[in-house]
Every structure is written in C-alpha cells, then in structure tokens.
Image: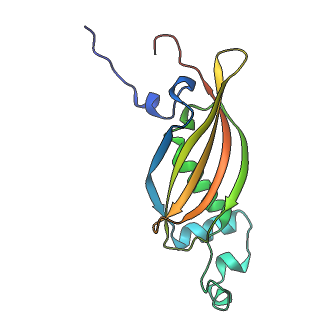
Amino acid sequence: MGKTIYDSKDTFGGYFEDFSVGSVYKHWPGKTITESDNHLFSLITMNTSPLHIDENYMLNHKHGKILVCGPLVMSLIVGMSVSDTSGKAVANLEYESVKHLGPVFIGDTIYSQSEILDCTRTSDKKRGIVYMETVGINQNDEKILSLRRKFLVPCKPDGV
C-alpha cells in the first residue's frame, strides 16, 4: 500500500466539498493590535481622523483613548479566516453586513470564528460558492465585529 503524502499547500483553505452548512471554524492564532499596526494602517489608508491617531484629542472622548481603525479590524478578522476557509478561493465575491459591535483599542487581542451558511455549486459543476459569517471577539470574549462574505472555490480535482 502506497504512502499518502499531503502537500502543505493543499491544507490551506478548502475545496467546495470540504464545506457544509452549519460547520464552525475557530480561527487561530489571534492578533494583539499594536500602536504601530493602527498608526501605519491609518496613515497608508489616509484615514487621519484624530479618533485613530491623536492620543491627546481622545483624552476628552467617551472612550478616553485611541480607537483602532475599523477597516484594520475587519481586515484582520477576514485574514484570520483564510487558512481555514478561503485559502483555495478563485475569487472573493462579496462582503456584506459588516457590523462594528464594539470598540477595539491598542493592546486588545482579537480572535475570530466562522460559520458556513450556504454552499452552492456553480452551473459548470467545477466550482462552488461558499457563504459564511465571521465574528470577531476580543480578549474579554466580547463581540467586536461581524460580517458575511461569499467566495468561489474549486471542486476537488479527480483523485483528491
């Protein structure tokens, strides 16, 4: 009997047949957000709101400290999900229903998990669309962001 060899690139994401409605993926590791993460992201995206970069300005704000830029949080939460879900994606098709559920501060550690909501094979039967919801939580287990997205993945090649 031959030995089965798994190539590490084949464990990055899944083929269409690997997904089923109701499956939940707990993504790991988390990411602790540093001051430099937030400042760099804010500046390279030209989001120079004092909410994200001016500590003195934020002293009199209701939170009393800098808020991490929302699109950075979204990017990290999506990024955390890729190795478990969309790593083999042919295309990201849609992001929807992005909800910022709580503030994120410098020094917070975020984690995420995703649930598969729907799987639909394309008419050519060679690919499928996976629809999922991802939720981000902080180190205190408080929900900070949720979003839904769709991505297109290939079906398993013959022999896999």
Q: Is residue 130 above or below residue 128?
A: below
Most distant residue in the left direction: 1
The part of the image, by quadrant, that contains residue 3 is top left
Residue at left offset 40%, top offset 31%: 8
Number of numbered discs: 0
* Residue 48 at x, y percent in the picture: 73, 73
Q: Position of residue 140 (x, y in %)?
A: 46, 69
Report whether 158 appears left or right of 75: left
| Residue 155 screen position, x and y as percent | 58, 20
Say if 118 sits above or below 31 in the image: above
Pick the front one: 8 or 68: 68
Q: Residue furthest top?
A: 1
Q: Residue at x 49, y 70 (%)?
A: 108
Residue found 51% across the figure and 70% down from its top: 34
Left or right of 4, for residue 19: right
> Residue 55, image x and y in percent?
62, 85
Q: Residue at x 71, y 62 (%)?
A: 45
Left or right, residue 79 beside residue 71: left
Query: Does residue 63 lie above or below 110 as drawn?
Result: below
Q: Quadrant of residue 122?
A: top right
Question: Which residue sits furthest front?
Answer: 22
Q: Where, quadrant-wise, is the N terminus in this rendering? A: top left
Q: Is residue 88 left or right of residue 95?
A: left
